[in-house]
Image: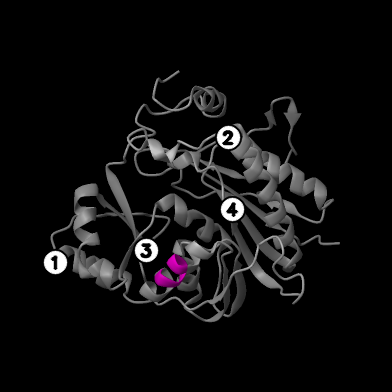
């Protein structure tokens, strides 16, 4: 086991979930990722602006609007008008993956159920080219201000609401073609040994509390999805209780109305989803979900895609 100052119980659990991992997993990454905001600038123009500043960048084959730069140069971008004008937006590549899987289109009805701080909401708006209906819901009032700020910065158009995601739509009967549930979680994928605050509140109790909330969010979201629609669930944690167990519970709860769609993104390193955890055997569809392998460029992430083409 790799020794760090992380909670020993967390380390023990992770050794079962991710046996092979880099010693630098929970260190600050040497590269920073930015999303080119095509609502304000073309990909080609953004590349030109970076070249004029002599900032080297790395393109991403499966995500043309994403770039990597060395962290020091990333700070230079953050201090420039490229960021302050909303041309480039700092967002981890792993954070962009759920929207790539959701694949929103112009003129669709799309819901981001847990929207703050707005990174994925503005990315969805970009995919939709601000055409159609995009609803951004955030229940936590303090985070709502950050959401509005990001939408304004990026020029993303969305209807904003602040309702408990477990109750949204129960009175208005809202329906959507695509729904993203980027659920609040224990954030284990973002732990940094140089920032003790990032893991100071970790506990099994918190994981259980998050899982309870996640189940309610996912189930309610499924009730607002049109037949034939797409529902994506994601977290930035390793905990099986918040990932595979939530998915397994949801598939049982909806009694065959939903199924997992296979996720495969060429260029994204993955490691196997769990088929069993603490004597609990999971639905045989589980390998269709995606566990993103953390490395020097990406944090750990979990993504599941559901379809209800067999909706009863």
Q: Position of residue 196 (x, y in %)?
A: 38, 35
Q: Which mark is residue 65?
A: 3
Q: Nearer the viewer, mark 4 or mark 3?
A: 4
Q: Position of residue 231 (x, y in %)?
A: 66, 60
What is the CA distance from the residue labelled 4 to the residue labelled 2? 21 Å
Question: Which residue position holds label 2?
Answer: 272
Residues in magenta, as a range: 145-149
Question: Which residue position holds label 1?
Answer: 52
Q: Main secondary structure of the magenta part?
A: helix
Query: Residue at image x 73%, y 35%?
Result: 282
Position of 136 with respect to 52 (left or right) is right
What is the CA distance from the residue labelled 1 to the residue labelled 3? 18 Å
**Colour style of the rendered protein structure:** one colour
Q: Nearer the viewer, mark 4 or mark 1?
A: 4
Dividing the picture into quarters, in which one does residue 51 lie? bottom left
What is the CA distance from the residue labelled 4 to the residue labelled 1? 39 Å
Q: Earlier in the sequence, mark 4 or mark 3?
A: 3
Q: Residues within 10 Å of mark 3 (few under 14, many from 20)?
A: some
Dividing the picture into quarters, in which one does residue 106 lie? bottom right
- Quick one: quadrant of the N terminus? top left
What is the CA distance from the residue labelled 4 to the residue labelled 3? 24 Å
């Amino acid at each position: 086991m790799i020794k760090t100052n992380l909670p020993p119980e967390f380390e023990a659990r992770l050794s079962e979930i991710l046996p092979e991992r880099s010693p630098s997993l929970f260190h600050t990454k040497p590269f920073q990722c930015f999303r080119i905001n095509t609502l304000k600038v073309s990909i080609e123009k953004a590349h030109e602006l970076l070249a004029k500043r002599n900032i080297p960048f790395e393109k991403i084959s499966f995500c043309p609007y994403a770039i990597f730069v060395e962290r020091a140069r990333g700070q230079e971008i953050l201090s420039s008008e490229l960021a302050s004008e909303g041309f480039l937006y700092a967002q981890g590549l792993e954070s962009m993956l759920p929207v790539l899987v959701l694949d929103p289109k112009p003129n669709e009805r799309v819901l981001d159920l847990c929207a703050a701080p707005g990174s994925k909401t503005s990315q969805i708006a970009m995919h939709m080219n601000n055409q159609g209906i995009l609803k951004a819901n955030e229940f936590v009032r303090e985070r709502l201000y950050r959401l509005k700020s990001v939408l304004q910065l990026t020029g993303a158009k969305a209807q904003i609401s602040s309702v408990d995601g477990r109750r949204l739509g129960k009175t208005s009967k809202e329906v959507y073609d695509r729904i993203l549930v980027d659920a609040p979680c224990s954030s284990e994928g973002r732990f940094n040994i140089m920032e003790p605050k990032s893991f100071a509140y970790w506990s099994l109790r918190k994981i259980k509390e998050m899982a309870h909330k996640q189940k309610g969010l996912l189930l309610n979201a499924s009730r607002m999805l049109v037949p034939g629609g797409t529902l994506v669930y994601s977290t930035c944690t390793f905990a099986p209780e918040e990932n595979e167990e939530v998915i397994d519970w949801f598939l049982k709860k909806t009694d065959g109305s939903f199924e997992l769609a296979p996720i495969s993104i060429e260029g994204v390193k993955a490691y196997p989803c769990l088929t069993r955890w603490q004597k609990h055997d999971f639905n045989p569809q589980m390998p269709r979900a995606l566990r993103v392998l953390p490395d020097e460029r990406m944090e750990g992430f979990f993504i599941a895609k559901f379809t209800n083409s067999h909706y009863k």
